């Protein structure tokens, strides 16, 4: 497809599966599409991208086309049907051009895929995050719970218009202009800050529009009163720290992109996917990302839920990743989300009647990384 970039299609079995055996057969067939990027040969780079804002969903083909990418696959798990208003909100890590727009969850099954677009070096593993705001004058500090996720009003205080009267803990959340057209509305308090962390305005209800350079802090429950005390006047200093599974800090430097997955498939050349039960571990379409022993990046899709390609269980997915030479690999969002696109055209066959809109995508740009959000 380009220097150092190949697209391979693998067909395992040509006889269609009986329709009533799609979930049980071990004979296939499988349709696998594999995008391989050799950092030593390519002039391009891999990055993550999303649509007009973080909370919207877009088709992978549209994300590839609008970003000017050569190719790409769907990436993170996202809110989807869990939020009609913010369906694209990542459920886990969302790191774009060095800017952390969604923190990794505390879920034990989240495994993150991080790539440095400057070098195409990849990190895979479980990341954790902590954040806080501190008043520069009083040094009063308030921990942050989320980045760009709507806060929850405690059930015990749902009837209180004034959340500062609540005695039950709530959420403290930072919002950036990338999240949506406006921050989430509802009961609680909101403090808008300028690019220097200094208070622009406060409100005893939530929901506002942010301009470039502004951020806001929202709080519910008894944290509403605490937020007004810490950030409601003067200026604050914010901390935001990503740590890898070895306890080492991962600076969110320019050119760093990261998406969330569920479960490691291979690690150091060994299959490590855990045993599990339920629909997630059963046969489904799959999207995987990994690296070979010699540093190539591999993005693969496995079509599923159809007689021409039945999909794979988690065990089978790990076996495919291993067979493709992925020394290290992670399982990305799959099912109806599984999509590969080249120059904005579909390469695989998604399992739904139409291509599903997703939260973000991993895309290969056939140019050197020059900065920007991705």
Image (spheres, helix red, strand yellow):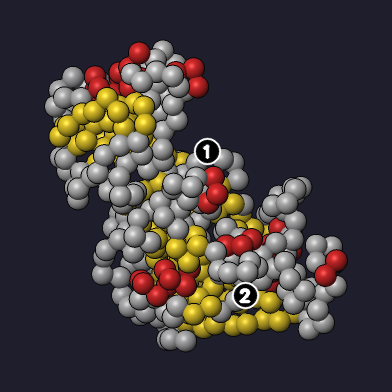
Query: Which is nearer the N-term, disc 1 or disc 2?
Result: 1
Secondary structure type for disc 1: loop
Q: CA distance from mark 1 to mark 2?
A: 33 Å
* Residue at position x 74%, y 61% in the image: 283
Which residue sits at x=59%, y=83%? 8
Nearer to the camera, 272 or 84: 84
Label 1 environment density (alpha carbons within 10 Å; few <14, some 14–19, many ≥20)? few
Q: Residue at the spot x=47%, y=87% of the render?
A: 1
Left or right? Give the position of 262 relative to 117.
right
The numbered mark at residue 164 is: none
Query: Going by the image, does 277 lie left or right of 185?
Result: right
Is residue 291 visible to the viewer in this orientation of the structure?
no
Residue identifier under label 2: 349
In the figure, residue 49 lies in which quadrant?
bottom left
| 273 over 63 or under it: above or below | above
Q: Which residue is mark 1?
A: 106
| Residue under the point 50% across and 45% down | 83
Picture quadrant where residue 299 is located:
bottom right
Mark 2 residue element: loop
Q: Quadrant of the C terminus?
A: bottom left
Label 1 close to label 2 by CB (< 8 Å): no
x then y, percent, for residue 12: 75, 79
How many numbered markers are drawn? 2
Q: Is residue 274 left or right of residue 17?
A: left
Q: Dot 2, how many residues are within 10 Å of its Cα: few (below 14), some (14-19), or many (20+)?
A: many
The answer to whether 156 appears left or right of 164 in the picture is right
User: Do we see residue 278 in this rendering?
Assistant: yes
The part of the image, by quadrant, that contains residue 253 is bottom left
């Amino acid at each position: 497809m380009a220097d150092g970039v190949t697209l391979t299609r693998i067909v395992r079995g040509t006889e269609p599966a009986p329709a009533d055996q799609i979930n049980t057969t071990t004979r296939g067939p499988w349709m696998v599409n594999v995008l391989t990027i050799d950092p030593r040969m390519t002039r391009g780079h891999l990055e993550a991208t999303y649509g007009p804002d973080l909370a919207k969903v877009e088709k992978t083909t549209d994300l590839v086309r609008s970003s000017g990418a050569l190719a790409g696959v769907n990436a993170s798990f996202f809110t989807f049907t869990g939020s009609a208003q913010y369906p694209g909100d990542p459920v886990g890590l969302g790191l774009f051009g060095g800017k952390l727009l969604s923190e990794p969850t505390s879920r034990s099954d989240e495994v993150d895929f991080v790539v440095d677009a400057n070098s195409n070096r990849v990190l895979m593993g479980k990341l954790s995050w902590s954040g806080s705001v501190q008043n520069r004058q009083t040094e009063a500090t308030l921990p942050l719970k989320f980045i760009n996720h709507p806060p929850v009003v405690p059930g015990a205080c749902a009837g209180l218009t004034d959340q500062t009267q609540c005695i039950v803990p709530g959420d403290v959340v930072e919002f950036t202009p990338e999240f949506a057209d406006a921050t989430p509305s509802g009961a609680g308090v909101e403090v808008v800050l300028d690019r220097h962390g200094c208070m622009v305005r406060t409100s005893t209800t939530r929901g506002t529009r942010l301009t470039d350079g502004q951020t806001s802090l929202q709080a519910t429950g008894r944290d509403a009163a605490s937020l007004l005390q810490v950030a409601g006047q003067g200026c604050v200093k914010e901390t935001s720290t990503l740590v890898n599974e070895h306890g080492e800090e991962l600076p969110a430097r320019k050119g760093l992109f990261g998406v969330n997955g569920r479960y490691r498939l291979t690690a150091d050349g060994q299959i490590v996917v855990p045993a599990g039960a339920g629909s997630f571990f059963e046969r489904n379409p799959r999207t995987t990302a990994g690296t070979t022993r010699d540093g190539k990046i591999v993005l693969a899709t496995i079509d599923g839920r159809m007689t021409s390609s039945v999909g794979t269980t988690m065990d089978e997915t790990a076996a495919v990743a291993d067979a493709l030479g992925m020394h290290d690999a992670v399982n990305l969002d799959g099912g109806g989300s599984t999509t590969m696109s080249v120059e904005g055209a579909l390469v695989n066959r998604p399992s739904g009647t139409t291509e599903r809109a997703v939260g973000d995508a991993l895309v290969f740009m056939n140019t050197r990384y020059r900065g920007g959000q991705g």
